[in-house]
Image (cartoon, rainbow, N blue to C red):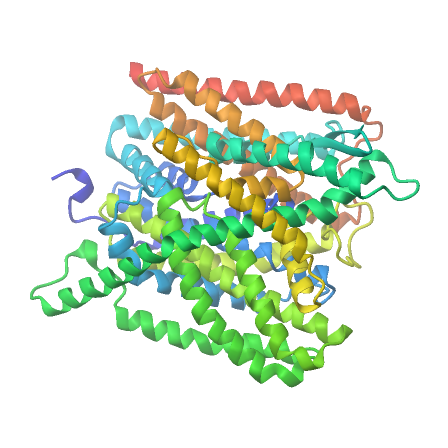
Amino acid sequence: MSDITAAPRSEFTLRGVILGILITVVFTAAQVYLGLKVGLTFATSIPAAVISMALLRFFRTSTIQENNIVQTIASAAGTLSSVIFVLPGLLMIGWWSDIPFLATFGICAVGGILGVMYTIPLRRALVTNSTLPYPEGVAAAEVLKVGSGSREGAAEGKAGLWAVIAGTLASAAFAALGAAKIFAAEVAAFVKVGKGATGIGASSSLALMGAGHLMGITVGIAMFTGLFIAWAVLVPILTGVFPAEAGASVADHALTVWATKVRFLGAGVIGAAAIWTLGKLVVPIWRGLVSAFEAGKARRAGSGDIPRVEQDIPLFVVGLVSVALLAPAGWLLAAFALGGPAGALALPLTIAAVAYLVFAGLLAAAVCGYMAGLIGSSNSPVSGIAILTVLGASLLVGAIGRGLIGPDTAKALVAFALYVTATVLAVAVVANDNLQDLKTGQLVDATPWKQQSALVIGVLSGATVIPFVLDLLAKSNGFVGAPNLNVVPGAEPLAAPQATLISTLAKGVIGHNLQWDLLGVGALIGLALVVVDIVLRRASKDRFSLPPLGVGLAIYLPSAVTAPVVVGAVAGWIFERVVSKDRKAEVAKRLGVLIASGFIVGESLFNVALALLIVSTNKGAPLAIANPPPEHLGMIIALIVAAVVVAGLYGWCRIQARKMEEA
């Protein structure tokens, strides 16, 4: 028997729990910032595993299973933070003036724990007895095995920690130079095209390049396709159809049409692609549920103890906790409804919302769990789930409040629909992560119930941090389109692109002025992309694909966000091709992943710290130098430095891998 399965061993330890909580707190702060800026988050399991291995190796009793518990707790940072795709919408519509702790913590905690509970009955069907690839779960398991199993693994663990540190410091320094105005924050060019206009922009951001590396070349190509459709096709056509307002510049014309027309087309693409994905999963999920209950029945009827690696939190506990959580969920929803002009409808709204949470939460948990196994939790189309959830919640809430629609009541109903959506999304994103973690646990001989308990701890830790960081950023930067009455003058508002879309959809459904025509055309584009993806997969025998959700996201997101992601995906692909012939190619690739993760963590954490500095100094740009270089020169400098830093760190990864080969 290998060392991995040897006993006795440490697994669920106090030091592991404390370390997991500390990593969760740090990574959650980074995730909140990144999600609000660009509408993307990153998987934290692998960086957390590397940090855990580097620190716990000083304890002789540390094990691979203990490191697995640490990464399981920390993985909550990469998932639960996705609720910020909805919550800023409550500030954007003017319902909240700040972020209340209890209301935010409550839905994160309740929804997150429900996400854990809902996916426990699916573990055997979708993990143990499944052929789903679980790319991130397998990758995390391989990192843990290599890091814990040999002298070479210890060396890789050290190199991995330095990779995360190097990427973090480089990205933080890069962001600091941008905050000092030495680097230009963005470059953009706009031109007239016949009667219309178009253009392109790109942020100088190592974090976005790191996100592109982690997403991979397939998603990068999909996002490039979305960029092309948006800015080379849709914007030129629609700017020709809808003339510019008097005095508007070419850039203003192109950006206005993109924001008011093209983004809704992108939302339609995302919605159609998500519905297609859900439709494909109905039969496999049903079979998985049947298999899970049959397996549980067989185990109860059998004799002897259940093997440790099959010990979940008992189903009766799962059911009891799930039902018990509906009480605080109902209290939170009722309190929210009673706090405004729709208070007279608090009872029917609460009953409907709790029922919707049960139904939509179960569906979202099953779908997200399956999609995490199919394409990985980072690439799982949570945006599509959020869009479908808010449409359903808005239709339900709008139907209940139909007789009371007025300006104030409509805002209250929109706010309630957003709050319900955030709760369901918390269920979905944690379920999206739970089965991925359980796959990692299966591969390293972990105990399922201990992992499930660890994720609950991670959920509570993340739920505690999110309100504070979100409120800090709301006060320092604010959000585009929100009243932002307390924002520091001169501070740059955060785009919060997902929250903008979700709140716009809720207002459109309840106010009966949603641009269904644009969503419908977008849905047709999405269906065409689905057909292209199917044909491409079949023609190449699944070697190539064009994920429609990735295309739709690039149509919807600003080009300043998606262009660096595409560059990062291409850069990561080139790096992996270059090192693929090396004997230690996989080691170099893993180090590259950690560098990319460090890029995201460094810039995100720097900007959280910058937000604190903005609030404390009451200056919008507290680090700006007196005489910064011209913007075009600042961008040239930024591009050169970014290229040197990325190439240099990739080269360092290859050198470290070769050193391990020679050792």
In the rendered image, the residue lying farthest to the right is 247
Q: How many marks?
A: 0
Q: Position of residue 231 (x, y in %)?
A: 68, 34
Q: Position of residue 463 (x, y in %)?
A: 51, 60
Quadrant in which the C terminus appears: top left
Q: Nearer the viewer, residue 620 or 557?
A: 557
Quick check: 662 above or below 340? Answer: above
Q: Residue at x 56, y 68 (%)?
A: 393
Which quadrant would the N terminus be assigned to in this image? top left
Name the one closer to the observer, 422 or 234.
234
Q: Quadrant of residue 418?
A: bottom right
Whole-percent x, y for residue 100 in the image: 64, 67
- Judge whether residue 470 can be spotted in this image: yes
Using the image as rendered, state which of residue 598 and residue 8 is in the foreground: 598
- Residue in the image at 65% along x and 65% along y: 509
Residue beneath the point at 79% across and 51% down:
488
Where residue 512 sits: x, y (%)? 70, 67
Taking the image as shown, residue 215 lies to the left or right of residue 133, namely right
Q: Nearer the viewer, residue 31 or 6?
A: 31
For residue 561, above or below residue 367 = above
Could one spot residue 500 in this view of the protein?
Answer: no
